[in-house]
Amino acid sequence: MKRNLITSAIAVVMFTLVLGLAYPLVVTGVAQVTFGDNADGNPDLIAKDTKADPRYFQPRPSQTEYDPEATFFSNRGPNSSAARSFYRDQLAAYIALNGQYNPGLTNDKVPADAVTTSGSGVDPHISAQNAAIQARRVAAVRGIAPERVDELVEQATDGRFLGLFGEPGVNTTKLNEALDR
């Protein structure tokens, strides 16, 4: 019995040191070396609430009002009446904001990311299709040539992860900052 208790205590101490101390330090060190400033937090990685200001590109809707200290996703299931209401309202707001600048924009032409929240609630990326729809509005409202807005969209577009995974995304935070400059 005494031997089992000693072995168990040693195992707890060893696993605590390895998994509770060594592993987190190694992962943090790799993140610092690999990702530099982004490992400590980068404001360009957080969506900003533009309050539906037509001069700005709108990020995905947020469950947390874009609060980086309270990131979480919505818990709306496909059969939820709350989900139907939320998506219906988001779709109507998107059409109201962008419809007059995109003749023929109908519900079925609105990209899914325009009305659905991201997993974190603070993701600044939108699809290229969403950006193309919003670009017409932003160019018209700001009085900027559409070609110039398209250039800024291209500059704010991140490619696929490792060139293979996911879809290219347009960083609305970087894009809106470029528009203000």
Image (tube, rainbow, N blue to C red):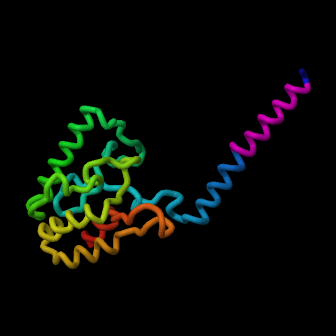
Residue 150, image quadrant: bottom left
Residue 14: horizontal and vertical position, in percent?
79, 40
Is 64 positioned to the left or the right of 35 in the image?
Answer: left
Our reading of the magenta stretch's main secondary structure is helix
Q: Quadrant of the N terminus?
A: top right
Count of number-bearing discs: 0
Identified at 26% across, 64% down, the residue is: 129
Residue 137: horizontal and vertical position, in percent?
15, 65
Identified at 77% across, 34% down, the residue is: 12
Identified at 36% across, 69% down, the residue is: 157
Residue 48: horizontal and vertical position, in percent?
31, 55
Q: Height in image: 18 above or below 158?
A: above
Residue 63: horizontal and vertical position, in percent?
32, 42
Q: Is residue 6 magenta?
A: yes
Q: Height in image: 141 above or below 40?
A: below
Q: Is residue 103 magenta?
A: no
Identified at 25% across, 49% down, the residue is: 115
Is 16 positioned to the left or the right of 103 in the image?
Answer: right
Q: Height in image: 160 above or below 69?
A: below
Q: Quadrant of the C terminus?
A: bottom left
- Name the outermost residue toward the top: 1
Residue 36, image quadrant: bottom right
Residue range corresponding to the magenta coloring:
3-20
Judge by depth and name the residue closer to the eye, 163 or 178: 163
Judge by depth and name the residue closer to the eye, 146 or 69: 146
Judge by depth and name the residue closer to the eye, 66 or 162: 162
